[in-house]
Amino acid sequence: MAHKSFRLRSPTTEAPLARYTLMAVAFLFLALFLILPLVAVFIEAFRRGAGEFFASLDDPDTLAAIRLTLTVAGIAVPLNLVFGVAAAWAIAKFEFKGKAFLTTLIDLPFSVSPVISGLVYVLLFGAGSALGPWLKSHGIEILFAVPGIVLATVFVTFPFVARELIPLMQEQGTGDEEAALSLGASGWQTFWYVTLPNIKWGLLYGVLLCNARAMGEFGAVSVVSGHIRGLTNTMPLHVEILYNEYNFVAAFAVASLLAALALVTLVVKTVLELHYGAEIAAGRKH
Amino acid sequence: MTTSAAASGRWRLRQPSVIPGFGLTLGFSLAYLTLIILIPLAGLVWRSAGLSGAEFLAILSDQRTLNALKVSFGTAFIAALVNVVFGVIVAWVIVRYEFPGRRIVDAIVDLPFALPTAVAGISLAALYAPNGWIGQILNLFGIKAAFNPTGIVIALVFIGLPFVVRTVQPIMEEIDREVEEAAATLGAGRFQTISRILLPGLSPAILTGFALAFARGVGEYGSVIFIAGNIPYVSEIAPLLIVIRLEEFNYGAAAAIATIMLGLSFAMLLFINLVQAWNRRRYGHGA
Amino acid sequence: MDVSVKNIRKEFDRYPALNDVSLDIRSGELIALLGPSGSGKTTLLRLIAGLEQPTLGKIYFGAEDASHRTVQERHVGFVFQHYALFRHMTVADNIAFGLTVRPRGERPDKAEIRRRVGELLEMVQLSGLEKRYPNQLSGGQRQRVALARAMAIEPKVLLLDEPFGALDAKVRKELRRWLREFHDRTGHTTVFVTHDQEEALELADRVVVMSQGAIEQVGSSDDVYDRPNSPFVFSFIGDSASLPIRVADGAVHFQDTPLGITPRASDIASGAGTLFFRPQDVVLIEDPAAPALEGRVATSRRLAGTRIADLDIGKPGAPHHVEIEVPLEATAATGTAIRFRPTRWKTFAE
């Protein structure tokens, strides 16, 4: 039909050629820089077959590294969870002087190099510091031991939960809490039965990102750990050691566990965004 | 109204509220923040302030330090530029075009946030090394993409991409179609509309994304050290030099380099923030 | 420039937004597209501009078929509802934009552009504001910048989408008058979309009343107000009352009671229909023997210089509500019976 033979394109889109070129550029770039590295982890891990893969994981040092990573995340994430909720409560539910400054301080660890995040604890607790010799004489080990690793991890994952909750709770205002209090609920009851249900998905989202970073942190932990095999090696550090020993299959096997964790994180994150977008809300910009 | 007059006359930390828990939550938050973040950071500044001016200058003017800073800031700058170009294209494709798997592509952009840096590091090294999948191909063209500054840029492109995409994407979604149509009715072709209307409108967000990717790149360690080759004076990044100085128990030098890095990063973020504030004042928007 | 729209159909996802619409716009005319939301008036405007493509039909600019011309080639001045100013550009740069994007050969030089911008600013009475950014202007000023920007390309027609929609009432009235003067001065063919009938009736040479993707009536303000050609136009423009009636033996009946009015040539000759009249076009009938409509006052209210009575007419169980104007001195207490007859009316077949 004559009227179908000529179609003008909408003035707010590009010509098909430009459109396909842009899409091709974007996909090629993503494939080269994101997808290939992810795929390569698994391919390298299974290069010598599944048997070798599982054998290289079934190693006392590797298992110790996995245990340590879980332990560290198991301490650091709850600590930052409690802090995140407390800070968000204070910042979102009250008006007080210096609030903007406090919010900025909470984001501070994001703009500090991971290596520096570790360095600050070395300077604080190390041999050259005022605290170091005193701790040593009392038999307390922080550096090159689990407490130091936990501290460094807490530092780098510090803002995750708080920055997810603050905008969300600010958006929700104080109306619900005031209503609960006026109905006779105590402060704790108000929090448990009113506030927490309102923020649970946002909280989960923050915890998810916090956990991913806690388990994967490398630079900060590397500086404070001392790299003692079987004792102070987390999974990412163990990957480095295996890699530097040219034990590539084992290195990529451990790395593939971390990559699988990253994939699970991405899937859960996407599902949360899809179904609870409004309840995760404003804090979604990283 | 005497009570309110009296109340407003007095300095108050906070406005009155019926909601409980202010003291508890703020007290805990401040204590935790102080212990975990502020005291350790203050310790760093204290340690480098303990150096005399001459010592500080000596560390700073050490050629290896200078080169490491140059490598870190230079590669981070180039990587952030690359990410601005491709990040904007990726964001545009995700926001504007309909294609199967769009949601997956959107999710994949966050991979660098989720994937541990060490994992990214060994994987990129394996891919871009001269005997790696991509490295082999690049070798044919005489390009060496690993164990030199190019390798650092590649790692930082990986790390920085989501910062640009996630900053630009929401602003792109809010673009008013009427503005594009207005440009078209005034005779502007699509390219003119993009280059003269859309990109300038996105520029505050692009600038923010650039700054975030750049800041992250300057401090990045885990993904870089595997692919960098770590040749002193050539492809040794500043964070690695900090680690090396620490291993030599040269705490002063480590603290000094760290302080300079922090200072430069903050100066840059401050500069970007000033530009944004100026933008906002003028055009009534920013990002 | 004349603009003709010929048998246009426009579908969005198979749903017709416009169905077989034809309209001739004369050169220099100021024409209003009036209708409720969803009537297709904005779609028609966007089709003329080339921002949308018709599913069927053609659009002519003068004698030329412009259907295949892109929006850039059509040289229409389009003023958007929310102005769509470029917020990172100054007022002067906004106005100059259409000139600066021309191909190099046709582009006026810098001095010429500056002179033209100055002229346009003067024309929209914004001289001195060229260095401002859009967010530093009031709504009315933005509107005029948008107009100057559209005029800069010397458009063949000027198209305005709800030009006063986003302004407050006072500014809206001022700008309305100003736009009329502006049009009379420049003589551009101008089409504007509005849902505000007062605006359309006051401003336009001709009003195009639209409903559900079709044109109901095209005519002067007097035409569409005094001689509405459809039940929709009658009830959409101005206040009106309607009653189901029946025409038989050369007389109009309501529920078998003759009203004392006789159908004219333009009315239906016989059978069931609807009677329309305006509240002010009635006369009260004192004589109880004379044929008339009889209603009981449900409520009445004073409205400026008149009194409006809300009458229940017909059987008590399911009465029809009709509003009429009654003299201030008439008794209109609730429950009072009032007998009246329309003086101007129109009937439409069912």
Image (tube, rainbow, N blue to C red):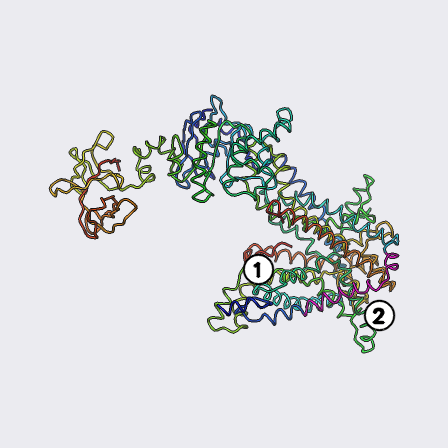
Q: Nearer the viewer, residue B102 or C183?
A: C183
User: Label 2 belongs to which residue?
Assistant: A127
* Residue C212 is at least partly visible in this image: no
| Subunit bearing disc 2 | A
Q: Nearer the viewer, residue C258 or B3?
A: B3
Quadrant where the C terminus of chain C sits is top left
Residue C156: x and y, percent? Answer: 50, 26
Q: Amino acid at mark 1?
A: Leu
Dot 2, crowdedness within 10 Å: few (<14), some or many (≥20)? some
Residue A203: x and y, percent? Answer: 60, 63
Does residue B35 show up magenta in the picture? yes
Dot 1, crowdedness within 10 Å: few (<14), some or many (≥20)? many
* Residue B138 is at least partly visible in this image: yes
Q: Please, is residue C47 above or below residue B152 in the view?
A: above
In magenta, the rendered stretch is B31-59
Mark 1 lies on a secondary structure that is helix
| Subunit bearing disc 1 | A
Does residue C97 show up magenta in the picture? no
